[in-house]
Amino acid sequence: MDMPVSPSHTGTRAHAPLASWPAVATVGIGAFALVTTEFLPVGLLPQIAAEIGISEGQAGLMVTTPGVLAAIAAPLTIGLAGRFDRKHVLVFLLGLLVLSNAIVAMATSFQALMFGRVLLGIGVGGFWTIGGSLGPRLRPGAEGGRATSLIYSGVSLGTVAGVPAGALVGNLLGWRLLFGLASGVAIFVVAALLLLLPSIKPQQSSGLAQIPAVLRNRKTQVGLLAAVLIFIGQFAAYTYITPFLNQVSHIDAAALSALLLGYGVAGFIGNLFGGWAVGKHLSFTLSGTSALISLSAFGLAATGDSAVAATIWTLAWGFGFGMLPIAMQTYMFSSAPDQLESVAALFVSTAQLAIGAGALVGGLAVDYFGVASALVIGGGAGLLTVLIVAMSSVSR
C-alpha cells in the first residue's frame, strides 16, 4: 500500500515530541480562526464599503489581498523563522491575526483597512507553512494523517460554520464588532497554544536553501503539477456554481443557501474520511478525490437542469473537495518527509496562486461560453489530475 511517510521513520523523531490531541486540535482551531477571518468580508462588503466610503470593488480587495500576501509569505516564512521554536512562530503568526482584526475593527480609512488585511495575509501564509506541516510531527507514525486531518478540519469548519455565522452576526451587530470578536477568539487561540503545544524544534533540513532540492524531487514535481490542475479546476468551477444553480437548475435563494450549506457539511465529512483514507492508500485517495470532483462537475454540467440531479452532484462534489486538502497535503509530505516546511511553503504558494488563476479562468469561460463551461473546465482539470497521479504511481 502507498502509505504516507512520517518523519518518525526518517531520523527526525528527536525533533517531533508527541503532542496531546487537544494540542493538535488547538492548531486546527487556529486554522478555523484564520479561514473564517480571511473570508469574513465576503458577506459584509456593502456595509464595509458604505461606512469607509469606498466602492464594493475596492472593498473586495479585503479578500484578494490576503491570498496574494499568503502566496508570498509562505516561502519567506521558513527563511525568516530560521531556528526559532515553531511553537513561538505560531504564536507570533496568530498574534498577527489578533492585530489584524483589531486594526480592521477600528479602521476609518481604506489604507488602514488594507494594512490590517496585509497582516492577515502574512499570518495565513506563515501559518499554513508551519502549522499545516505539523500533523506528522506532533503525532508521528500512522497517526500523522489523522492529525493533519484534524488540523485541516478547521478549514472545513471555517467554511461551513464560520463564514455564514460571521455574516449573520455582522449583519445583526455590525461588521466592526464582528472583527473585534474575531480578535478576541484569536487571543484565546494564542493562549491555548502557549498552554498546550510542546516546544517544536525546526527540522535541520528546513529553510529556503532546501527548496531547490525539494523541487528536483520527482514526486514533489508530480504533486505540485497535480495541485495546480486540481485547484485551478476546483475554483474555475466552484466560483460559478451559484449562478449555474440559479440559472440552469432553477433553485431559488432559500433552497440554494441550504444546498451550499449541505456542500459544506459534506466537505467536513469528506475531510474526516480523507484523514482515514490517506492512511490506507495515499495515491488512490488523491486520485479518488480528484475523480469525484471531476465526475461531479461533469455530471452537474450534463444533468444540472434537474434540481434533484443538481443536488446530488453538489453534495458529492462537497464530499470530494473535503477530502482534497488532506490528500494533497499528505501526498506532498510523503515526497520529502525530512523537509516538511519547505514542501508546505511550496504547496501553500502553489495552491493560493492556483485558486486565483482558477477563478480568473472560470470567469473568462463564463463570459465567452456560458456558465456551464466553467464546470467543464473543472471536470477536465480533475480528470487530468487523476491521470497524472495514476501514471506517476504506476511508473514508480
Image: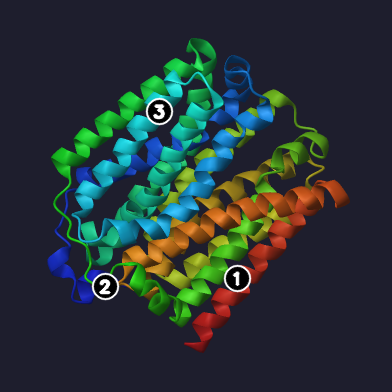
User: Which amino acid, by three-letter code, is at mark 3?
Assistant: Asn
Q: CA distance from mark 3 to mark 2?
A: 34 Å
**Disc nearer the start of the sequence (2/1):** 2
Checking the image for residue 101, the label placed there is: 3
Question: As drawn, is 25 to the left or to the right of 156?
Answer: left
Q: Is residue 327 visible?
A: no
Q: Measured from the top left, where is residue 230 in percent x and y?
A: 60, 61
Residue on which the image places disc 1: 386
Q: Measured from the top left, where is residue 318 in percent x and y?
A: 57, 47
User: Which amino acid, by three-letter code, is at mark 2?
Assistant: Ser
Q: Who is closer to the viewer here, 230 or 107? A: 107
- Total label count? 3
Q: Is residue 343 visible?
A: yes
Residue on which the image places disc 2: 205
Which residue: 31% across, 43% down? 93
Q: Residue 47 occupies which quadrant of the picture?
A: top right
Q: Residue 53 occupies which quadrant of the picture?
A: top right
17 to 383, vertically: above or below? above
